[in-house]
Amino acid sequence: MIETLFKRAVTAFLVIAICIALLQGMSLKYEDKSESPIFEYYVENHEETGAVNLVEAILLDYRAYDTFGEILVLYISIAGVIILGKEIVEGKSEEGGFGS
Amino acid sequence: MKSIIVKTFGRALAPFILMYGIYLMLFGPVSPGGGFQGGVVLASAVVLVLVTHGKEKVKRLTQNIEWFDSFGVFVFLFFGSIGMLIGGSFFVNLTPYSMTSLVFLDVIIAMKVFAGIVVLSIFFFERGAE
């Protein structure tokens, strides 16, 4: 019993340490990019897209290609869950899937 | 065991949540909201009924809803390529200065997110029911 507790403690510690390291790493590289010309352009003439809501204008018009990627990711992830999960639900696969 | 109160409230609240989801979906470009949020709120209404009343109640609605999921991606792609056919770049705004293309995209995204989350929740609901 003690070993499992010890193992869990060590893995938890490792996970937390890695997360903190990553956060430190990410925060060092951040420099203020809010004055970049693209944002200026978006803010100035987002009326051309016909959207009052700037977020929608960017999401659907200036960055529609990114939204397309977003939708693709969403679709593939859900299709993946359903395909992989079908066996589990019908009980074909023996290990029973989620955490059982 | 689902108490009567939960069942009645589930059925009573569902249409209002759906209405709010449709509002979010359609008023994307004007007010805060948009495709994704609208789709999620719509899905939450269906999941509410799914949880309180079980799968049979939602069976007819979600008969072939996964088609919406994949259909949405193709329509979005098609909408993008129309811009290319006409000569502009990939996602040329077909109707500049008017919200029709935005609302159209919003509706597609909302349908897609709605279908995806409903299918997912039904799948997990089945998984838990054993």
Image: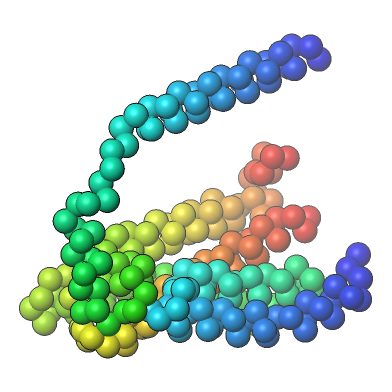
Query: Is residue B57 among the parts visible in the rendering?
Result: no
From the viewer's perspective, is B47 left or right of A62? Answer: right
From the viewer's perspective, is A37 left or right of A11? Answer: left
From the viewer's perspective, is B27 left or right of B48? Answer: left
Q: How is the image coloured?
A: rainbow
Residue A23 vertical position relative to residue B44 in the rendered view, above or below: above
From the viewer's perspective, is B91 left or right of B19? Answer: left
Q: Residue A13: give x, y in percent of width and height.
A: 61, 19
Q: Quadrant of the N terminus of chain A?
A: top right
Say which residue appears at 77% left-offset and 58% top-offset. B129
**Quarter residue B52 falls in:** bottom right
Q: Residue B118: give x, y in percent of width and height.
A: 59, 69
Residue A98 vertical position relative to residue A83 in the rendered view, above or below: above
Q: Residue A35: give x, y in percent of width and height.
A: 22, 51
Query: Is residue B5 among the parts visible in the rendering?
Result: yes
**Quarter residue B43 falls in:** bottom right
Pick the front one: B43 or B20: B20
